[in-house]
Amino acid sequence: MATAGLNSMMLWGDFEGRKVEDRWLLGRLIRPEGRRAWFEAIGPDGVPVMLSITEALNDEDELLERLQAAAEIHHPNVVAIQEVAVSHLDDVPVVVAAMEMTEENLGDVLRERLLTAAEGRQVLDAVLAALGMMHANGLVHRHVDAGSVVAMGDTIKLRSDCLQMAGPGFGMAAADDVRWAARMAAHAVTGRFPSGENDPVLQLLPESMARAVRRALSGIAGATEVAALAGTRLELLPEIGRDAVRIEPLSKIRKRTIVAEDVVGPAVGSKTRVAAAEQKVVAEPLVEKPDPMNAEMSASGAKPRVIAMRPSDTQAQGALFADPFMLPSEHPATEFGMEEGEPAMSRWRRAPYVIAAAIAVVLVTVFTLYGLMRT
């Protein structure tokens, strides 16, 4: 009903310059997505914001619940939702989410050039950190793609207006988020989406990143595990005075000259920057000695990063450390044969010998009974 109203009335771009709730003045249309669109806007206090406007199809309550749950997530790599409201555009009900202003998105960058391996690793780290916090709060993304990765000042962020409550299928949906994050990062560096764990294109990635991407592509890994394989530990730390790691924003990536690729990205003007996030990304080594699993980082002298989050949510803390995304009922094979001090699936490896021994016992018994009967 509402969809027909919007389609017959106007296109999303026709709403530029209009006011919503007499509060937000809509500016440029950033991106339409079916019944959802992103607009630059000016708030009632004159501060620029990003508006996510979703046409309601008699599901206003569900949209509000999802957006309000997403607004509870506060993390430096997650686009913050400041306010949620139900409104109307030409008598058509819509749900509006006012978000912090962001700048470039990764999709725009990739239309001009690929990322370097270091830049791809920064994107992967940020997206995994965002997904870790989202999953810890029981929400899944389902839209992990280049257009959903944005920059705000010096920080790479993942949009949050599309979060959903997965319900019983949470484990599979969360692992799927991680799988798509790995595919996106690999594509951003190589220009190809890997088809699976053994795709030759993964050989073009640094070893630690390739190792993490392969595990993510298995479809049974959570954000914490994949980040650890890449050399980044996600954990909750108390806020202490440490120097923040400066992650190069996507808006600056386009300004750099890449000599190896002989590509020069055009300069992109930076928009109004919002105050620094409350939580920080801090530098701290995983171990005191160089990590042998991350040879290229050790050789360059770089330290594995630790992404710190405010320990305000005990549920998030438990989820981030335990990485409980894959439930036993969803992947029963992964819990079979686990013994202390043995790798997973160890009993599967012994299975042929056990079966052969059982067959031998049965045959000996049959022949013995046959001989007794003849006697």
Image (cartoon, rainbow, N blue to C red):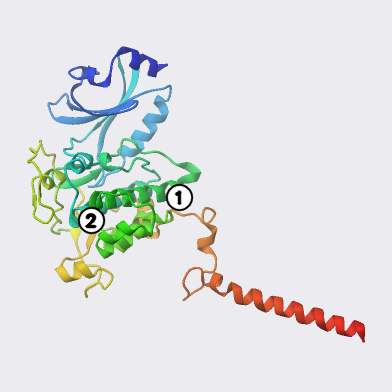
- Please name the amino acid that badge 2 sits on: Arg
Q: Quadrant of residue 72?
A: top left
Using the numbered discs, state the Cα–Cα distance from disc 1 to disc 2 in whole angstroms.
25 Å
**Which quarter of the rendered picture does the C terminus lie within?**
bottom right
- In this rendering, does residue 228 appear at all? no
Q: Nearer the viewer, residue 343 or 322?
A: 343
x, y percent for residue 161: 31, 35
Marks 1 and 2: CB-CB under 8 Å?
no
Question: Residue 171, labelled with which disc?
Answer: 1
Characterize the local packing of mark 2: few (<14), some (14-19) or many (20 or more) Cα atoms within 10 angstroms: many
**Which quarter of the rendered picture does the N terminus lie within?**
top left
Question: Residue 149, labelled with which disc?
Answer: none
- Please name the amino acid that badge 1 sits on: Gly
Q: Nearer the viewer, residue 221 or 313?
A: 221
- Residue 213 sits above or below residue 38 on the image: below
The residue at 23%/21% (across/down) is 13
- Residue 18 sits above or below residue 50 on the image: above
The residue at 53%/61% (across/down) is 333
x, y percent for residue 372: 89, 85
Characterize the local packing of mark 1: few (<14), some (14-19) or many (20 or more) Cα atoms within 10 angstroms: many
x, y percent for residue 77: 24, 47
- In this rendering, does residue 243 appear at all? yes
The residue at 28%/70% (across/down) is 293
Which mark is nearer the camera, 1 or 2? Answer: 2
Q: Tell me the SS state at disc 1.
A: helix
x, y percent for residue 241: 15, 58
Identify residue for label 2: 121
Residue 112 appears left or right of 132: left
Q: Nearer the viewer, residue 144 or 308?
A: 144
- Count of numbered circles in the view: 2
Which circle's residue, 1 or 2, is located before the other in the chain? 2
Residue 292 appears left or right of 275: right
